[in-house]
Image (cartoon, rainbow, N blue to C red):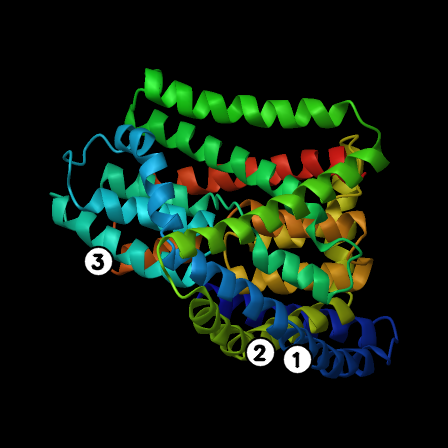
Amino acid sequence: MVLNYIWIGFFLVAFVIAFIRVFFLGDTEVFTEIINSTFDSSKTAFEISLGLTGVLSLWLGIMKIGEKGGVVNVLARLLSPIFTRLFPDIPKGHPVTGSIFMNIAANMLGLDNAATPLGLKAMEQLQELNTKKDTASNPMIMFLVLNTSGLTLIPVSIMVYRAQMGAAQPSDIFVPILLATFFSTLAGIIVTSIYQRINLLNRTILLGLGGACLVVAGIIWAFTQMDKEEMNAISTMGANFLLFFIICGFIYAGMRKKVNVYDAFIEGAKGGFETAVRIIPYLIAILVGIGVFRASGAMDMLIDGVSWTVRTLGFDTDFVGALPTALMKPLSGSGARGLMVDAMTTYGADSFVGRLSCVFQGSTDTTFYILAVYFGSVGIRYTRHAVACGLLADLAGIISAIAICYFFFA
């Protein structure tokens, strides 16, 4: 529903601005530009979608091997000591704990198809424990915030889009996304814990979160000792090494479980073509809407207005061109994806704006969509502090993404 209003809004705003340009400024070419943009955007969306098929098939096949090889279960066990303390209202040993672990672990690995059913199952089990069936419970809200903060170890889809858009090093945003999504998730946990009065100052959580913070601080410190060229080279090399290590690790895990890794890969890879075809209408719709919005001059007006405000406040304005992606992400994943592609098309995949839009896309998740789907599935009407905590996590992710991209790419 939200995306419906946004899409209609693109056309309404474009029509109003085009009308003003024609009848008040005498610019009779604007409607030609708008119509041309619809054809160009449709062609671009179709070419991008089909171009994704090969790489999507590769990674979905690798992910299926990892899934059958028990990697998700291993991550669940590793996260167990911390998660039991973040959900103190869940009885010890309740089966919902396993569903939560599996969902979060699947999200971290980018297994969206596996994560959503696991998440809905976890929400149903949490509803069984909920004493007020129309009101979100504390564990429900913490679970939602962990999902909306978008913690992801492998941003496969974003790297695929960057490869399709001609990026020289599609994986150069791997480390920046990892850092930005970490800060988003950390902020979400802290804010939700404050609302719910969860004590974060216990040994297990301090060791877990503190250890993660030290690792991130160490990564940032190490990069501060390098110049920009060396930093980008090491970041890209490290990302490529880690990705190759993950591929080999997943295959090894499948072999240990005596999984037929070839058949598992084929099973997962079959979904690559289906996924690429499935996103064609969505990508065409959003790119045509954005194209019309941009051709009318509305996008330039929006960016110029934000740039003027930021410049007046004394800040650098290089990041403003990527802001539409950040603002769209809490509302719609497909909308933000379209704006990310539009930013790479307009500014270049390896431009600062193109890279920052990718980091925005990977640093958080679609807050309102997740709230609607997960809470709607169990009939929750009163969300309490879920929206506030989710949006604060999004804000932390946006601020972190800007700072990290200036650090890596400015």
Q: Position of residue 304 (x, y in %)?
A: 79, 51
The residue positioned 33% from the left and 47% from the top of the image is 73
Left or right of 160 in this view: 237: right
Viewer-nearest residue: 155 or 199: 155
Residue plotted at (15% across, 37% down): 93
Q: Secondary structure at mark 3?
A: loop
> Tag 3: residue type?
Gly
Alpha carbon separation for disc pair 1 and 3: 37 Å
Query: Looking at this view, is 22 or 342 the one in front?
Result: 342
Q: Which residue is mark 3?
A: 379
**Three-letter amino acid code of the residue under disc 1:** Phe
Residue 280: image tag: 2
**Residue in the picture at 20% in, 54% down:** 124
Q: Visible in this render: residue 136?
A: no
Q: Is residue 402 above or below residue 337?
A: above
Q: Disc 3 to disc 2, how far (Cα)?
A: 31 Å
Residue contact between numbered discs 1 and 3, judged by CB atoms under 8 Å? no
Sequence-wise first label, 3 or 2: 2
Q: Which mark is residue 46?
A: 1
The residue located at (50%, 49%) in the rendering is: 249
Q: Position of residue 204 (x, y in %)?
A: 34, 21
- Crowd rating for badge 1 (residues with CA inside 10 Å; few <14, some 14–19, many 20+): some
Evaluate if marks 2 and 1 touch, with contact meaning CB atoms under 8 Å apart.
yes
